Amino acid sequence: MKDDDQLAPQGLRGLHALSAFFIGFFVLLHMTNHLVGLGGQETHIAFMAQARQIYRQPYVEVALVGLILWQVGSGLFMLARNLTRIKGVAAWAQALSGGYLALFLLVHVTAVIAGRAAFGLDTDFRYAAAGFFAAPWHWFFAPYYFLGVLALFVHVGCAAYWNVGASRPMLGATLLGGFAGLGALFAGLIVMALSGALFPVAIPAHYLAPYGQ
Ligand code: HEM
């Protein structure tokens, strides 16, 4: 895959990048929430209560879910279109991270909506962490969340790579490697926090009910 035709056509790529820019505001807040939450369950919940004042507005949530559907749909369309032409480490990293991110986002947002609408749960830290305390579900949630955060960072790193990589390949590769390394570190820490490896985690019984426990 050459630089000038990656993820063609150009217009679709531009709209994919534009919606990523808007989704990015939420994702930045959301990742900050998880990093602040490394300080403890209560810290995570307190930060989310503040952050929700911004994104738990009906028009913000509808716009966010709409943008995510567009992001996933346009991403999968470009992936399918270019699948046979993918060549090189950066192009494969972009395709694999994008493909996983699309799958992750569909499952993740559906789970959040189901948690609120079907199970009547407050989808805070306890909802995210419950799966780690409902064996054997921890075998699913540890790689699922780890790869979700890693894929996000790798995908952003790929965008940085394509933007500078054509003219300065060493800088592009360093940026991609840096994003991937940081993503793996954050992903590991977040999974450790959710699983109770960093601080004690308390999960009320009704959060375990959806797992039949
Ligand atoms: C370990 C990783 C993650 C965990 C534990 C996690 C957990 C959560 C939780 C608990 C919520 C509900 C928030 C609320 O009720 O206010 C949520 C919502 C959401 N998350 Fe994540 N998340 C993770 C990673 C990600 C990533 C990597 C993305 C995007 C690339 C993402 C995108 C979203 C979106 C779009 C929502 C829905 C917001 C809404 O409409 O209310 N999450 N997540």
Image: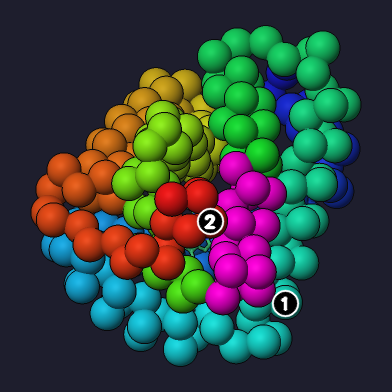
The image shows residue 192, relative to residue 22, as above or below, that is above
**Residue stretch rendered in magenta on the structure:** 104-120
Task: Identify the residue shown where x is 67% and y is 42%.
Answer: 102
Q: Is residue 113 magenta?
A: yes
Q: Where residue 34 sits: x, y (%)?
A: 32, 59
- Frontmost residue, 187 versus 127: 127
Q: Check disc 2 and give the amino acid type.
A: Pro
Which residue lies under the disc numbered 1? 62
Q: Is residue 33 magenta?
A: no
Which residue lies under the disc numbered 2? 210
> Element at badge 2?
helix
Q: Find the distance from the CA under tag 1 to the CA under tag 2.
A: 25 Å
Q: Where residue 186 sits: x, y (%)?
A: 29, 43
Q: Where residue 12 sits: x, y (%)?
A: 84, 47
| Left/right of residue 70 with respect to residue 59 in the rendered view | right
| Left/right of residue 100 with respect to residue 211 in the rendered view | right
